[in-house]
């Protein structure tokens, strides 16, 4: 008689893209499927993200799912040991430690699904997503729609002057923009300077 092999290989899935691209909706969709299959699911989000709801993951269209708010990657590991499927939203806020935690959990046979921003407001890769992309078995890039021209949008444009990498907000300070319509903050400064110089010259 052939032995029955129970295969418990884990893996990492990354869902990433700009703001307003449906990352959280996609994360919720996958986690709901797992819950319907009666798999044990744990969902985490960082304390920094207190938009809309304290103990739920909420997407921009208000679909929600109960989640645990945690301070750091270690807390995720400690609370994920019983789970078969682990969801982590806004993963870019957990820093470098989250990479090891995702790897360890996947090595233990768990399905780890993370969602987050792949670029910051300057259009630069947002760590630790680049490392997670390299290590993941499955990658999904989600796209928003450019508010200027309607093309698929891959960038998050900040409409305020702030130069902090993390400024929490939604459509009050951020817009989805395509490659053509996205203006990195540095080039904006150059344009402004140029204009000033021209004014000085013309005066
Ligand atoms: Zn555009």
Image (cartoon, helix red, strand yellow):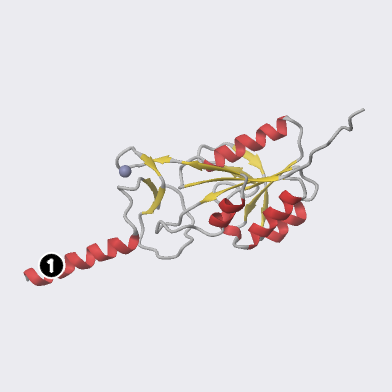
Q: Position of residue 91 (x, y in %)?
A: 59, 53
Which residue does the image show at 61% across and 52% down from the upper left? 135
Q: Nearer the viewer, residue 120 or 169?
A: 120
Which residue is located at x 69 percent, y 57 percent? 101
Residue 83 shown left or right of residue 93 in the figure: right
Q: Does any portion of residue 50 appear in the rendered image?
A: no
Q: Residue furthest left?
A: 203
Q: How many marks?
A: 1
Q: In the figure, 152 relative to 168: above or below?
A: above
The answer to whether 146 is drawn above or below residue 120 in the figure is above
* Occupied quadrant, residue 146: top left
Quarter of the image that includes the N terminus: top right
Callout 1 crowding tier (Cα within 10 Å): few <14, some 14–19, many ≥20: few
Quadrant assignment, res 42: top right
Direction from residue 39 to residue 47 in the image, left or right: left
Q: Classify residue 117 as left or right of residue 145.
A: right
Q: Secondary structure at mark 1?
A: helix
Q: Residue furthest right?
A: 1
For the residue pair 192 and 132, the one nearer the viewer reads as 132
For label 1, the residue is: 198
Quarter, ligand 1: top left
Q: Position of residue 195 (x, y in %)?
A: 17, 64
- Name which residue lies at 9% across and 71% down: 201
Percent across and percent down for residue 56 are 63, 44
Please give the name of the residue rendered at 69% of the width and 54% of the height, measured from the top-left corner: 103
Judged from this view, the residue extending furthest toward the top is 1
- Where in the figure is residue 154, as x and y percent of width and height? 41, 46
Of 154 and 138, nearer the camera is 138
Residue 147 seen: yes
């Amino acid at each position: 008689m052939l032995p029955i092999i129970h295969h418990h290989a884990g893996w990492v899935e990354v869902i990433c893209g700009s703001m307003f691209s449906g990352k959280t909706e996609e994360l919720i969709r996958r986690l709901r499927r797992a819950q319907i299959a009666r798999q044990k699911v744990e969902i985490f989000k960082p304390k920094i993200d207190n938009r809309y709801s304290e103990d739920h993951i909420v997407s921009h269209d208000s679909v929600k799912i109960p989640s645990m708010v945690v301070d750091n990657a270690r807390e995720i590991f400690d609370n994920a040991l019983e789970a078969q499927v682990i969801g982590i939203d806004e993963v870019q806020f957990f820093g470098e430690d989250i990479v090891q935690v995702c790897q360890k959990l996947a090595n233990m046979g768990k399905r780890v699904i993370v969602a987050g921003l792949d670029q910051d407001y300057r259009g630069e890769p947002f760590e630790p997503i680049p490392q997670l992309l390299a290590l993941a078995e499955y990658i999904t890039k989600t796209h928003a729609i450019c508010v200027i021209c309607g093309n698929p949008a891959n960038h998050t444009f900040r409409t305020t002057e702030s130069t902090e990498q993390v400024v929490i907000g939604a459509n009050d300070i951020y817009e989805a923009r395509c490659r053509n319509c996205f203006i990195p903050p540095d080039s904006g400064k150059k344009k402004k300077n140029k204009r000033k110089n021209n004014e000085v010259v013309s005066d």
